[in-house]
Image (cartoon, rainbow, N blue to C red):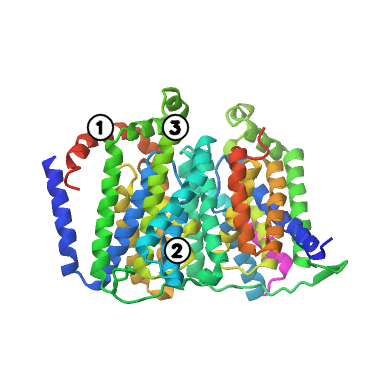
Amino acid sequence: MSTSRALWLVGIAILIALPTVIPTYFLHLVIQILIWAFIYTAWALMGRFGFVSFGHGAFVGVGAYVPALLWTYWDVTPWLGIPLAVVASVLLAVIVGYPCFRRRVVGHYFALVTLALSQVVLLSLVAAREITGGSLGFTQKTVGHSWYALQFPDKIYFYVIAVMLWLAGLWIWRWIDRGIGREALEAISEDEDAAAAVGIDVTREKMRVTVISAALTAVGGAIYGQYFMYLNPETVSGIAVSLQIVFAAIAGGVYSLLGPSVGALLTLSLTEGLRVWFGTNFIGAANTIYGILLVLCIIFMPQGIVGTLQRIRPQRWSQAKPVAAKESVTT
Amino acid sequence: VDIYLLEAIINGILLGGVLALLALGLNLIFGVVDVVWIAYADIVMCGMYAIYFLYAEYGVPLPLACLIAIVGVAGLGVLVHLLIIEPVLDSPPLNQLLATGGLLFFLQSFATLLFGTEFRNIGVRLPVLEFASMYVSFARLIAFVVGLIGAVALYVFLKRTYVGTAIRAIAQDREIVGLMGIDQRRVYLVVSAVGGALAGLAACLLALQYDVHPFIGNTFGPVIFMICVLGGLGNMIGGFVASFVISQIIAIGGYYSNTELAYVFAFALFIVLMFIRPRGLFAP
């Protein structure tokens, strides 16, 4: 156990030292990876129990747009805008999630209902083109360096924010792992009816993890919006973003703490690397290769994916449990 | 009666014809192979590009270009089944969904790589018909009529031919058909080809009305799933009826507000209907 704690300390030391040694361009990449790693981790909080949501693009969109619009048009500080975005996301998650869980909409029916949710947010953003600029996107009002507006031209600030956010995401994952809710959720993901029969409040347990997941995703979206300043409905909401989240998290592995983060690291570095490699003459080349890899990954690594991992899961978690209990202090 | 509302309703019915065709194709594949092709609308996009290049770039006569596109997309359907679906046939439904989702990523980016992101139009200008001082797009009328003919042809194929009977048998009971001497794999291939051909036919009809671009699948793909789920996945009649319900909502919604909000309303209604009837509107 002490080796893994040592590894954590080394990892955090590297994260602290990183901005002093790498050029700004790479820092920009690392910030993006950390923000998305946080969002993927938030998705996997649900995804690892077999609740595969294709609707998280909706929460990223709400998270990114609510504070940005409030700030740009009504001068509301993001310090208020972000909590409002979280409230809006949670509301959305409850409105769609609660009836889904009550009515036992599961499996790919659940995936398709949540897919509709991400389209609802995307199309609403496009439809409100007077204030959001529609498909052309919009740029937030900039004021330079400001804590009040949460805008920092110097990337180091967002680096620190992104690192803290990411660590908080991992900590919440551990917190859920340690709580009694995890056993209940595990039981539900094995067999809902059986879980209900032994007295587990299926709807409540699912609702709790969904609300946490949606709230965190909205925070991730908000930080993304504050960092990039330019928002486009297609890049923060809709089916494309939802699929991006699902794929990266699953490719990395949803059953281990660092899985979704590894997914973010791999997919974003791959996309960026291919983009640089092929240059702008071949737009789409990067994603073409990415798409092929995704299909191959799902066909030839079924071990890495939802159903088959469920078989290995029990022993994996029984190993992970004591680690989780001890490491809670470090993170 | 408000003449513009009536016009919107008629256009909605016409839109429903093409959506019904696509819903039939997706439902056929789901009902038989038991896999949801998330990338179905992107296969239609491939067909639209085929027509665009054959007709607008290489001067192939339009009917021939359409025929080639239909056959080509049918072939693509078979290819998709062999390369992507077959290896994941025994995987959990979510993995199958993700495999075809990867295909969606691939097709969209590959089209971007090959053709760029610009919107292309085949440049056929069909007249707008005036009927009792209402304006109806001729292209939509053709799409509606051909869509219905396609649906009837599919019905006849399923009811009157040996292969059609085998297909219906598999949809009813996957386990027992092997004992009846039906080659399951061959039926799957036929279904994928027919599903592809329907996508190709839809591509011909859509190419007359819309510009083709790599992401056109995203505009109507989600609508088709919504229709199929609403009608009950695999339920042909349900999907057919749901196509017209949804197209009416989009048309009338578009009349009262704008197209995006009409879609928002349709998706929201879909979510609500799923809570009321989780297995589809027409589930037994």
Residue range highlighted in magenta: B59-73
- In the rendered structure, which amino acid carries the disc numbered 3? Val
User: Are the residues flagged by discs 1 and 2 from a single subunit?
Assistant: yes
Pointer 1: what residue?
Answer: A318
* Residue B22 % position (x, y): 66, 52
Residue for badge 3: A202
Horizontal side of A47 relative to B198 (left or right) equals left
User: What's the magenta bit mostly, secondary-structure-wise?
Assistant: helix
- Asked whether B61 falls inside the magenta stretch, the response is yes
- Can residue B158 be seen here? The reply is yes
Q: Is residue B127 magenta?
A: no
- Location of residue B50 (image quadrant): bottom right
In the image, what residue occupies the spot 39% across and 51% down? A215
**Helix or strand or loop: what does disc 3 sit on?**
helix
Query: Which amino acid type is marked by label 2?
Result: Tyr
Q: CA distance from mark 2 to mark 3?
A: 32 Å
**Closest to the observer, B255 or B110:** B255
